[in-house]
Amino acid sequence: MSCLERSSATTPSEPGTSGESGVQDSPRPTRQMQAAPWFVYLIECRDGSIYTGIAIDVAARYAAHAAGKGARYTRAHPPARLLGCIGFPDRSSASKAEYQIKQLKPADKRRYAEAMGSRMIQPPDADNTDRVARR
């Protein structure tokens, strides 16, 4: 399943319970609702540059970029193709990973995108990589 399919798939919500009256009760306030996953995605633009962003629905976000209604960057640098995406449990972790990816050089972003397509990988962490290399 591609990242476009994963992000567009809807997760069924948990219905309320039926009471004796047969009317469905609303979910209890103490019940935790399942949060939608966030995705970090990389787009290769027509000029060869790479755009990195986050979204809940990557397919819809890519369509917005392609239609010229996405980010300002992709209005000036139209997208050519989606390089890859990776899921995160919440917006905060997706934003942190997006920042780390944006710090990479273009060649490293391409290698990261290739790894995204083949398997789920950890976000790049330059500090952690340096520590592992020194041991």
Image (spheres, grey):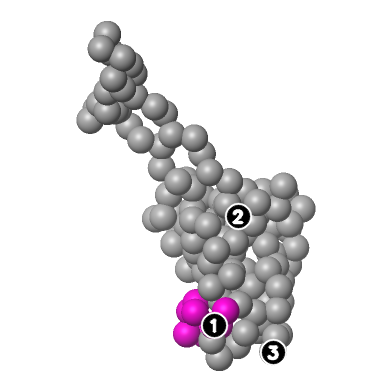
Report, in whole angstroms, how far the alpha carbon at label 3 lies from the one at label 2: 24 Å
Which mark is on residue 132? none
Q: Residue at x 34, y 24 (%)?
A: 16
Question: Is residue 38 in the magenta section?
Answer: no
Label 2: how many Cα within 10 Å (few below 14, some 14–19, many 20+): many
Q: Is residue 77 above or below residue 69?
A: below
Residue found at x 64% / y 56%: 4
67 is higher (above) or lower (below) than 93 = below
Could you tell me which secondary element the residue under label 1 belongs to?
A: loop
- First to last magenta residue range: 67-74
Q: CA distance from mark 1 to mark 3?
A: 15 Å
Q: Nearer the viewer, residue 53 or 29?
A: 29
- Label 2 element class: strand
Residue 68 among magenta residues:
yes
Can you give x and y, in whole percent of width and height, for residue 17 in the image? 34, 18
Residue 101 position by quadrant:
bottom right
Q: Earlier in the sequence, mark 2 or mark 1?
A: 1
Give the mark, 1 or 3, whose residue is nearer the N terminus.
Answer: 3
Can I make out residue 78 in this image?
Answer: yes
Q: Which residue corresponds to the image point at 43% horizontal and 49% vertical from the top-left? A: 90
Query: Who is closer to the viewer here, 118 or 123?
Result: 118
Estimate the x, y position of residue 3 in percent, counting from the top left: 65, 54
Q: Residue at x 33, y 32 (%)?
A: 32
Q: Are marks 1 and 3 in contact (CB under 8 Å)?
A: no
x then y, percent, for residue 47: 69, 89
Task: Give the residue at mark 2.
Answer: 86
Q: Which mark is residue 47?
A: 3
Which amino acid, by three-letter code, is at mark 2?
Answer: Ile
